Amino acid sequence: MASLDPGLTIEAANPDFFRHVARPSTEVCGRSIYDVLHPSARTVLSKHFSHLSTGHGSRFVERVVAMRGHDRVFSAEITGIAVKGDGDDLSGVVVLMSPDDEPAAEAERPARQAPVLTALDARILEGVATGASTVQLASRLYLSRQGVEYHVGLMLRRFKAPNRAALVSRAYSMGVLTVGSWPPRAVPDFVK
């Protein structure tokens, strides 16, 4: 996952993105998204990014060829999601990259300890990811406002997130929440 500014410059990315493109953050951040993609991707993606910037769409999914390092290529599915700022103007784009060769890379990666959520924590995390307020979650889950805040606080500490937006972002980057579906759902492997 990478975060782009409206000019399609990579501002930040998660470790998986850097691993996929086989380049360090110092080489990728501050460069155009097209610098990590095969030149053929520009013709395919320019129309999609243009639609996002003019407000004619909020997301797209496209198959592209990306660069791994400077001399290898891999095919991937890219999802671009518009991030709106004040006045409905485009303030950035979130790009999710899913390489086709992920299973082999996944086998090479050391196993990570999955954060375990209770069923209630999973429901609260799903609600936070949809933008539900504490009061809305409390009424849906038959809890008090303080009960919802208690569980959100526990998850903030567990995921080492400073706020709700960072909690959702970390949950997506760790694979706890499903990508490409609405409303977001917790992956059953993370729920006890």
Image (cartoon, rainbow, N blue to C red):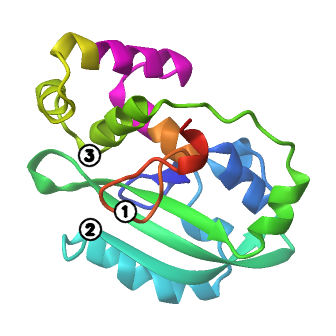
Among the two numbered marks 1 and 3 on one chain, the one whose residue lies closer to the N terminus: 1
Q: Nearer the viewer, residue 122 or 14?
A: 122
Residue identifier under label 3: 130
Relative horizontal placement of residue 45, taking residue 114 as reference (left or right): left
Label 2 Cα crowd, 10 Å radius (few <14 / some 14-19 / many 20+): some
| Marking on residue 17 | none
Helix, strand or loop: magenta stretch: helix
Label 3 secondary element? helix
Q: CA distance from mark 2 to mark 1?
A: 6 Å
Tell whether position 56 is magenta. Answer: no
Q: Give residue 136's quadrant in the image.
A: top left
Q: Which mark is residue 58?
A: 2
Q: Quadrant of residue 71?
A: bottom right
From where the camera sits, is residue 13 visible? no
Residue 166 is left or right of residue 74, and the answer is left
The mark lying in front, picked from 1 and 3, is 3
Residue at x-position 87% and y-position 43%: 110
Residue 182: x and y in percent read: 31, 61
Going from the N terminus, do you reach mark 2 or mark 1 first? 2
Location of residue 7 in the rendering, given as x and y in whole percent from the top left corner: 40, 60
Quadrant showing the C terminus: top right
Label 1 with label 3: CB-CB less than 8 Å:
no
Between residue 54 and residue 164, name the one nearer to us.
164
Q: Which residues are magenta?
A: 149-168
